Amino acid sequence: RAKSAGRARTALFDASLRAQLAEQVNLERDLRRAIEQTQLSLAFQPIYDLASGRIDSFEALVRWDHPELGAVPPATFIPIAEDSAMISPLTDWVLASACRRLREFQQLQGQGLRARLHVNVSGTDMCRSNFVARVSTALLSNQLEPGQLTLEITESTLMHRLDAALQVMAQLREIGVGLSVDDFGTGYSSLAYLSTLPITSLKIDRSFVQRLNADARDAKDAEVVRAVITLGNALGKTVIAEGIETPEQLAQLRLMGCQFGQGYLLARPLTPEMAGALAQAERLRDAPPGAVADRDADAP
Ligand code: C2E
Ligand code: MG
Ligand code: MG
Ligand code: MG
């Protein structure tokens, strides 16, 4: 009896696995098409200097409007792209489109100001031999300085192939591209690696920021965030808090000496047009954070 139950379970497992695989294969095929056609777009979420309220840079976030499924979140299709050959064309599309937009923002911002951009890249793609050349091409063809670009790599994909990643990171730093550890605190790199990684900034994961509430003022969670900010600052890294949603979180982060932040409270991911308008407004005055909080690219 145990044997047949086991067999039934296996059959069930096989069926759902097959369905899952089929879905994955379709998404992979569809993604190939999406890159060739115009189903992909970019949203831009500002990163603010928390002390001055000025925009420091924009993070490009890819969007996929699937013809049948509608909006497919990057959390669903990026892992599929990473497991297939699709990640490189996807990265190249994002890099080229984001750099082209940054060039536009820069023109809107006017003389003297240099708009800056953050682009998410997959650790697996970064480890390909031609990666640095591909980044250079995107910068050169849009007449951008390497210092205007920061690449964000999630802590988990970074640690996955650390040795290979470190080599590429060193080359990127050599040409002047900034490097940021994304979702810091969720992977395994921990504080021990912070001083040795050739990074310019770190982004404290949203899950830590979310625990900074008024009633948790003295809680251990707040102390963890404080420690990361203090250490990051001491090591000369730019510290960016992601996922700021409440005024309490913002106030606490400021008190803790966190210089940069991002989140729905300040601005949602915006259409390129909205982001451009914001860049233009920066030219004339300090943009008050929150002013564009409800005009987002994700709204239906
Ligand atoms: P991430 O780089 O950590 O980006 C932050 C994510 O949190 C974004 O989700 C953003 O829309 C969302 N977010 C921003 N502020 C808030 C907030 O205050 N509250 C909450 N709850 N969420 C907030 P999104 O756009 O769905 O992207 C998810 C992840 O997908 C990104 O996480 C990034 O790891 C990956 N991703 C996005 N675009 C790209 C890309 O072009 N290439 C690669 N390789 N990965 C990408
Ligand atoms: Mg990111
Ligand atoms: Mg992040
Ligand atoms: Mg995140």
Image (cartoon, rainbow, N blue to C red):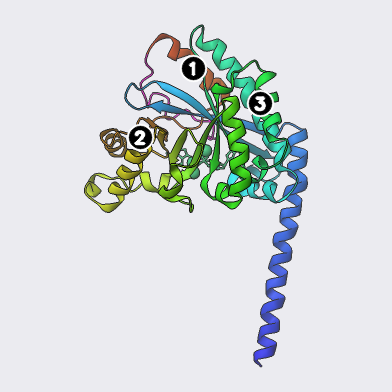
Disc 3 designates what residue?
A: 97
Residue 73 in sight here: no
For mark 1, does the 10 Å Cα neighbourhood hold few (<14), some (14 to 19), or many (20 or more) residues? many
Inter-mark Cα distance, 2 to 3: 32 Å
- Amino acid type, label 3: Ser
The dot on residue 279 is 1
Q: Quadrant of the C terminus?
A: top right
* Closer to the camera in the image, 159 or 45: 159
- Residue 294 in the magenta stretch? The answer is yes
Q: Which residues are magenta?
A: 286-300
Image coordinates of residue 187 in percent, x first then y, are 49, 52
Q: Left or right: where does residue 184 sit relative to residue 171?
A: left
Amino acid type, label 1: Ala
Identify which residue is drawn at 59% across, 28% down. Answer: 174
Amino acid tagged 2: Asn
Q: Left or right: 32 with respect to 189?
A: right
**Residue 233: image tag:** 2
Q: Is mark 2 within 8 Å of ligand 3?
A: no
